[in-house]
Image: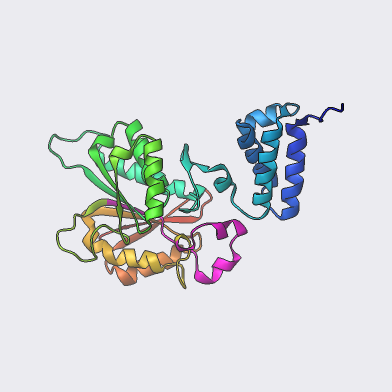
Amino acid sequence: MSQVPVETTAALLREGVERLREAGSETPRLDAELLLGDAVGAGRTVILAHPDAPVGADAAARYRADLVRRAAGEPVAYLRGLKEFYGLAISVDRRALIPRPETERLVELAETEVMHRLGAGSRPSGTPPLRVVDVGTGSGAIAVALATVLRQRRALAFVEIVATDQSDDALGLARENAVGHAVADAIRFERADLLPGPAGAAGVPSFDVILANLPYVRHDAMPGLPVAASFEPQMALDGGVEGLDVITRLLARLPAALAEAGVALLEIGADQGEAIVERCGETLPGWSCLVERDLAGLPRVARIRRG
């Protein structure tokens, strides 16, 4: 009776890399490592450290099934059900956009802004909490990451975080992530078109810090995005003719929504640095708009405030 040959991690990795390379994956080696690690229940470092380790038949079958889906363009993050973001494992699926590494710059700036406004955590008794809103929260990555780091810095008790989205599905995913990282009690999730309450409504509370990673891809650029993007909610990517349609709607609501000394931090595309300054000048005459760059030196976040 012949024995079924044992498959090793090295052999399966070679198979996966070849298959994904032929399919046109931009990162075939990384994709194969992540998928194999997920199939066997180990991290990529373990996979790479044990090239001769045997892989069970069930794990190998799952790995090959995922390779088929990845070769068809489905994002690795959706296949694994998670994406690393700001040091956290964020659950992801087709209900929301996959968090991008460049968005970590927005969280970094938000953390610095909040801590500066809190005065390193010293708040007089009776001082109202600092009000922060994450507009278009999607998976909740920004709000959850900010809440988590503020908890680590013992500042979360002095901050009120609201996260909005117009998609009930996305809000469901965001709540799951908040629960998974034990910050569900620190974030209020609301279904809203951009900001809580109707535009221009009296009595709607203002926010000290407004954060947003809204759609900013130009409509005519959508067909040229990687195939993986076609699996994500298109409304979370398509920013209209110039890529600034949704962002411009938010700009128009800032006078009523932003506290007098507040700041809005809005993620933009790497080619929109000049455009956002011009659009802000048209929509908010007399306001200040400075563009923060990411680690690659590219325009990434517009910092907007009165005067």
**183, above or below 173, in the image:** above
**293, above or below 29, in the image:** below
Q: In which quarter of the image is the C terminus?
A: bottom left
Q: State the image coordinates of residue 95 (x, y, percent, origin top left).
A: 46, 53
- Which image quarter: residue 240? bottom left
Name the residue rendered at 81%, 30% in the picture. Answer: 4
Left or right side of 203 for 150:
right
Q: State the image coordinates of residue 210 (x, y, percent, origin top left).
A: 31, 53
- Which image quarter: residue 202? bottom left
Left or right side of 243 for 28:
right
214 vs 112, nearest the viewer = 214
Name the residue rendered at 43%, 68% in the picture. Answer: 275
Name the residue rendered at 29%, 38% in the picture. Answer: 185
Residue numbers of the magenta segment: 209-235
**173, above or below 33, in the image:** below
Q: State the image coordinates of residue 260 (x, y, percent, origin top left).
A: 20, 56
Q: Is residue 282 magenta?
A: no
Q: State the image coordinates of residue 197 (x, y, percent, origin top left).
A: 23, 60
